Amino acid sequence: MASPSATSVTRRRQRNTRVTVAVVLVALSALAVAGAVPSGSWLIASVAAVVAVVLGATATKITHSELMATRVEAARDRAQQAQAYRAITEARVAEQAKHDAFLTDEIARRQETIADLEAALTAAHQRAADAVRARAEEARRADRSERDGQALAVRLEEAEQRAAEAIVHVHELETELDAVRSELSAAQATTGWKAQSA
């Protein structure tokens, strides 16, 4: 907490002086009345009573002005504190909104990546199926035609190689899709955001 400024220290000192003066005035009024009572004079007692009332009223006025000044300063301090809390809250809300926007964009990017990988996986499955069908067709042609067996054997080997490469590619895409889905699940768990099914 910041140290009090010189002005506030001066105010506190001045206020303490005001309260001290008010106490002294009340004490003087009590002494005046206490001194007038033993004298037995009605005039001295009346003057002492008037002086006591004036001193008491003055002490009351000083105490009242001190109380009002204290209330004004306390209200000012509360207003400044409320402004500071409002600024802190606004900064936190802005930071949270920025974080939420970032996570929403990140989730949208991950979903787009998943959609792209699923499309690539579907295409790879189709290519693998086509390659398997082509291999089967080549095998049938090789069986039907022994005189072209050598050429067909080479083509069959190429088709098998393409099929094997397609299967490897499908496996790689499936592995990448699983990794991206895991990242998306982690991001959704962090934000509490649930993706809508497409």
Image (tube, rainbow, N blue to C red):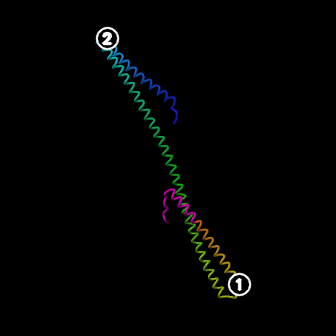
Q: Amino acid at mark 1?
A: Gln
Q: Name the quadrant containing residue 32.
A: top left
Discs 2/1, front: 2
Q: Which residues are magenta?
A: 177-197
Rendered image: mark on residue 3: none
Badge 1 marks a residue whose secondary structure is: helix
Q: Nearer the viewer, residue 10 or 26?
A: 26
Q: How many marks?
A: 2
Residue 187 on image: x %, y %: 53, 58
Q: Amino acid at mark 2?
A: Ser
Around disc 1, counting alpha carbons within 10 Å, would you say few (fewer than 14), some (14 to 19), or many (20 or more)?
few
Q: Residue furthest right?
A: 150
Give the residue drawn at x 59%, y 65%. 176
Question: Magenta region's main secondary structure?
Answer: helix
Q: Name the quadrant containing residue 158.
A: bottom right
Q: In the rendered structure, does residue 183 fall within the stretch colored magenta? A: yes
Q: Earlier in the sequence, mark 2 or mark 1?
A: 2
Around disc 2, counting alpha carbons within 10 Å, would you say few (fewer than 14), some (14 to 19), or many (20 or more)?
few
Left/right placement of residue 47 relative to residue 162 reads: left
Q: In the rendered structure, does residue 164 fall within the stretch colored magenta? A: no
Q: Nearer the viewer, residue 167 or 64?
A: 167
Residue 70 on image: x %, y %: 42, 31
Q: Residue furthest left?
A: 42
Reading the image, the residue beneath label 2 is 39
Q: Name the quadrant containing residue 59.
A: top left
